[in-house]
Amino acid sequence: KEKEKEKKKKEKKKKANGSEDAGEEQEEDEAAFPYIHAFPTVADDHCETPLRAYKDIEPLLVQLCKGLGKSKQNVRVYDPYFCAGGVSSHLTELGFEVVINDNRDFYQDIADNTVPDYDILVTNPPYSRIEELSTQKEYTPKGRNAPLLKRLLRAEDHCERLLTFCASSKKPFFLLMPNYVYMKEYFQEATSRLKMLYLCPAGRYKYATPAGLRKKKKAELATAPFVSFWYIGVTNAHYSGVYAWWRSVWSTQSMCSLHSGLLQLPDNMKCRGDKTRQRPRKKERDAMK
């Protein structure tokens, strides 16, 4: 009887906390999130990029600013995909004073020709397929951006849409995306005429789900579902300067590695479908976790 009473007490406590393990695994309350997104979303896309990822690209951003005749104080950094505003706080913490990351529909801005003027695009886009969106919004191609929007609307996922936009913009970009993206046919098509660099971190980036955006146990709010790295596109005028500077000055000071081609990627960063990939050793596999 005593055991039965104790069991009932525990069950009652769990119920009160709304989780299987009192407190420790309590689910986040969706009502706690302060924003209503201005665009269709997928729950699994609600992840904020860690500060560490921005710290990794900071030296390259600063070097690129020099080539653009800009500084941290006046370079306009644009992230078209709003999550919870983390990119603004992180880049501001690193000294970048003009960060554009508003709760707006990026694709509607393209349709309306209202994409803000910017110098460098820096983003971690949603990884979901377009067909997974909660609602299928229709965009009407019009004006000078009509041909671009039509190409975007044929895309299968957000990464393809983003790469198509970046290739047409002729502006520098830093895209934090999964390693499988470079195996996609659309990646080869979008970047065939671009100068690309690839910045690989020492270990997997972990992405945080903002409180209230997904019903997740607290232990699951930081996740690293994919191997990801920075896909960097720069103009011909700045490519040699940025890459040469990294190799001669910064490579020995960074835990990251910068590569000018996909064949140079470390095996632990390559996609499993890549035939040039050799199976990583146990130490490298552990670093990927």
Image (cartoon, rainbow, N blue to C red):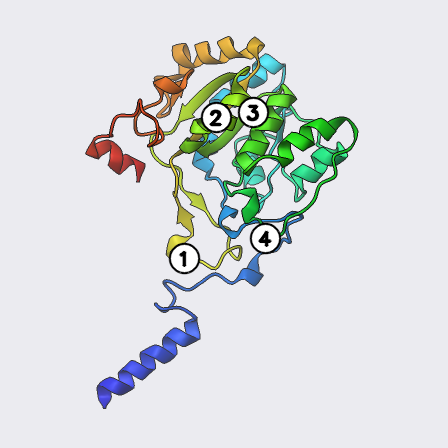
Tag in front: 1 or 2 = 2
**Which three-letter amino acid code belongs to the residue tagged 4?**
Ser
The quadrant in which residue 109 appears is top right
**Which three-letter amino acid code belongs to the residue tagged 1?**
Lys
Q: Which residue is mark 4?
A: 134
Relative placement, left or right, of 112 versus 241 is right
- In three-dimensional space, the C-alpha distance between marks 1 and 2, rounded to whole angstroms, equals 30 Å
Q: Residue at x 57, y 62 (%)?
A: 31
Going from N to C along the chain, the mark reached first, 4 or 1, is 4
Q: Which residue is mark 2?
A: 231
Going from N to C along the chain, the mark reached first, 4 or 3, is 4
**Which three-letter amino acid code belongs to the residue tagged 3?**
Phe
Return the residue nearer the eye: 157 or 106: 157
Q: Residue at x 59, y 53 (%)?
A: 134
Going from N to C along the chain, the mark reached first, 1 or 2, is 1
**Place of residue 25 in the rendered image (x, y in percent of width and height, measured from the top left):** 38, 62
Circle 1 crowding by C-alpha within 10 Å: few under 14, some 14–19, many from 20: some
- In three-dimensional space, the C-alpha distance between marks 2 and 3, rounded to whole angstroms, equals 8 Å
Whether residue 190 is visible: yes
Going from N to C along the chain, the mark reached first, 4 or 2, is 4
Tag in front: 4 or 3 = 4
Q: Which residue is mark 1?
A: 218
**Which three-letter amino acid code belongs to the residue tagged 2?**
Tyr
- In three-dimensional space, the C-alpha distance between marks 4 and 3, rounded to whole angstroms, equals 28 Å
Circle 4 crowding by C-alpha within 10 Å: few under 14, some 14–19, many from 20: few
Q: Residue at x 62, y 52 (%)?
A: 135
**Place of residue 120 in the rendered image (x, y in percent of width and height, measured from the top left):** 60, 24
- In three-dimensional space, the C-alpha distance between marks 4 and 1, rounded to whole angstroms, equals 24 Å
